[in-house]
Image: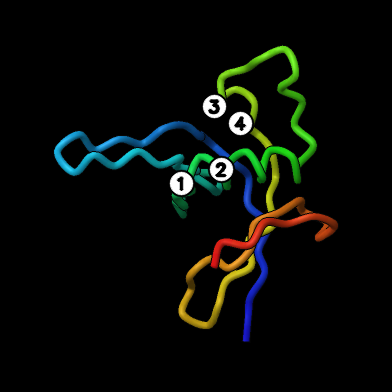
Amino acid sequence: MTTESVYRINTAGAFVVGHFNICDIRLDLGRPETCRAITLSPGNAMGLMRCLGVDFEDGAYMAEALRGQNILVVDDEDGNPLFLGDPYGNKSIDLR
């Protein structure tokens, strides 16, 4: 059984941990305070921007381009995200 929720992106950007050589894209979701954070690979982040129709043709910082966008998050029964996409369910990326 899956659950679907629509969240607002509060912040988005690179999340790095130098000691472990990790660089992911982190999305902080929810209002009024962050109620959830999801990390994506850079490739998945680009796919999400395309799904949401974010215009970055002229260049933009990811935090500015994604801030305020609404996204649909589909979770599995354990609460792990399976899909992210536009809030209407038209386009999505697979995180499995």
Amino acid type at circle 2 is Gly
Label 1, label 2: how many angstroms apart (C-alpha)? 24 Å
Mark 1 touches mark 2? (CB < 8 Å) = no
Mark 4 touches mark 3? (CB < 8 Å) = yes
Mark 1 touches mark 3? (CB < 8 Å) = no
Mark 1 / mark 4, whichever is N-terminal:
1
Amino acid type at circle 1 is Thr
Looking at the image, is mark 1 or mark 3 nearer the viewer?
3
Residue 67, numbered label: 4
- Residue indicated by mark 2: 43
Asked whether 45 or 69 is in front, the reply is 45
Graded by Cα atoms within 10 Å as few (under 14), some (14 to 19) or many (20 or more), the crowding at tag 4 reads: some
Label 4, label 3: how many angstroms apart (C-alpha)? 6 Å
- Residue indicated by mark 1: 34
SS label for mark 2: helix
Split into 4 quadrants, where in the image is the C terminus?
A: bottom right
Label 1, label 3: how many angstroms apart (C-alpha)? 15 Å
Label 1, label 4: how many angstroms apart (C-alpha)? 13 Å
Q: Is residue 69 left or right of residue 32?
A: right
Looking at the image, is mark 1 or mark 4 nearer the viewer?
4
Mark 1 / mark 2, whichever is N-terminal:
1
Mark 2 / mark 3, whichever is N-terminal:
2
Q: Where is residue 94 in the image (x, y as percent from the top left)?
A: 63, 62
Amino acid type at circle 3 is Ala
Residue 63, numbered label: 3
- 24 versus 72 height, above or below: above
Label 2, label 3: how many angstroms apart (C-alpha)? 16 Å
Mark 2 / mark 4, whichever is N-terminal:
2
Mark 2 touches mark 4? (CB < 8 Å) = no
